[in-house]
Image: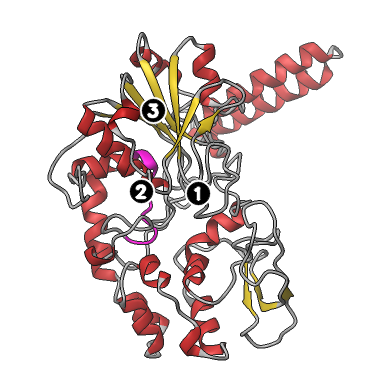
Amino acid sequence: MIPKLFFKNTFLFLVLVVFSCGNSISSKKAKGKRQKANIEVLNSARTDNNINLEKPIILGADNSVKYLSILKNKKVGIVTNQTGILSDGTHLVDFLLDQKVEVTKIFAPEHGFRGTADAGEHVANGKDSKTGLPIISLYGNNKKPKPEQLEGINVVIFDIQDVGARFYTYISTLLYVMEACAEQNIPLLVLDRPNPNIAIVDGPILEEEFKSFVGMHKIPVLHGMTIGEYAKMINGEKWLDPSTGSGRGIQCKLTVIPCENYNRNMSYTLPVKPSPNLPNDQSINLYASLCFFEGTNVSVGRGTNKQFQIYGSPFLPIQKFSFIPKPNEGAKDPLYNNKECYGEDLSGIKKINRLELNWLLKAYNETADKSKFFNSFFTKLAGTKKLQQQIESGISEKEIRASWQEGLKQFKEMRKQYLIYE
């Protein structure tokens, strides 16, 4: 019997021989073909023979063979923004038009179709300069598509990159789009995308009385689901309601086009900013933890080039690190505009794997006037009054985190049936 080690060593030897042969070919064209073949061989091996290579992730939008037939001879509405691109950089709208799909209307979430508007800024309806298609804003007073705005549309596509946080409003837009589609009996097609924070499920569970556009459902701050999985959960738990969102049991005709070669242990770097103030992987990883500061008198770096990677205020102790916010893209009038803020730079720390409270607790304990630290928005972000009460009472981070565990356990059990990826 030939030992398994023989096969492993033989495989590795043959791979080395292939690379050696490729290097000996003088023709650049031949060399390029040989290198491409080698990559395909190694990718097919993946984890065999101690070679751990991943196949490229295929986005839902890239998986057109699974959805173009659904769109044939249909009038299509698309809910998307600047993140709705294929892996080659082509925007989904342009791709579908090239495929002769009859796209009739674009619906845009917070920050607009091009993703340049400030957080909370009113985004007006308009027309796409490239395609001439009408753009309907799903923000401000028109968060949910009206029946007349969906008139004549046979199918709606939802393709927006999410970051896995309850208060990131794209999942709230998803809910309203699903409700509108259910009411008008229009099928909804969700093109799935990876969640860059998919490995983290953490934070307090939202309480029913504190529902708002920055928190629609009884889920933790970090839910650890892709937007396709989340859509399945909304439908499966019958959270759709034609009027109040309280859940009367309606469901939409939902189809999720999943990503391929993707699992819950993978990291994912977004090819474009999901919103103006999340410029890189670090900001996306720290977003949920630092976003609590939006409900306090502390800046999260809006008006700098390190948004959601630093924090500070004029009311924290003078220290070595400081920054001065100034107007920029996504922050036309930032908090503490042109005022020096003292705090901490987190842009170089290691990736975090939970919802961190230590920066929030530190800032509260060091602020000059604790009575002015929190504002009313904090409770909406937290989804409960308890977190502010715990902090003001001097409860330790360990005790605060312990108070979340039963709710997190129940949520994880509930969401199991909706997970697409292992």
Res 157 label: 3
- Mark 3 or mark 2, earlier in chain: 3
Q: Secondary structure at mark 1?
A: loop
Estimate the spatial distance between the alpha carbons at disc 2 and disc 1, rounded to whole Å. 17 Å
- Examine the rendered structure and indicate whether residue 242 appears above or below residue 127: below
Label 2 environment density (alpha carbons within 10 Å; few <14, some 14–19, many ≥20): many
Q: Which image quarter: residue 408?
A: bottom left
Q: Residue at x 17, y 44 (%)?
A: 238
Closer to the camera in the image, 49 or 263: 263
Where is residue 38? Give x, y as percent: 65, 22
What segment is highlighted magenta in the picture? 220-228
Which secondary structure dominates the residues rendered in magenta? loop
- Mark 3 or mark 1, earlier in chain: 1
The amino acid type, in three-letter code, at marker 3 is: Ile
The residue pinned by badge 1 equals 122
Where is residue 383? Give x, y as percent: 33, 67
Q: Is residue 227 magenta?
A: yes
Which mark's residue is nearer the viewer, 3 or 1? 1
Closer to the camera in the image, 277 or 134: 134
Q: Secondary structure at mark 2?
A: helix
The amino acid type, in three-letter code, at marker 2 is: Ser
Which colouring convention does the figure follow? secondary structure
Q: Residue at x 37, y 59 (%)?
A: 201
Q: Secondary structure at mark 3?
A: strand
The residue pinned by badge 2 equals 172
Estimate the spatial distance between the alpha carbons at disc 3 and disc 2, rounded to whole Å. 16 Å
Q: Is residue 235 magenta?
A: no
Label 1 environment density (alpha carbons within 10 Å; few <14, some 14–19, many ≥20): some
Where is residue 323? Give x, y as percent: 72, 72
- Mark 2 or mark 1, earlier in chain: 1
**CB-based contact (under 8 Å), mark 3 and mark 2:** no
Decide if residue 255 is in sight here. no
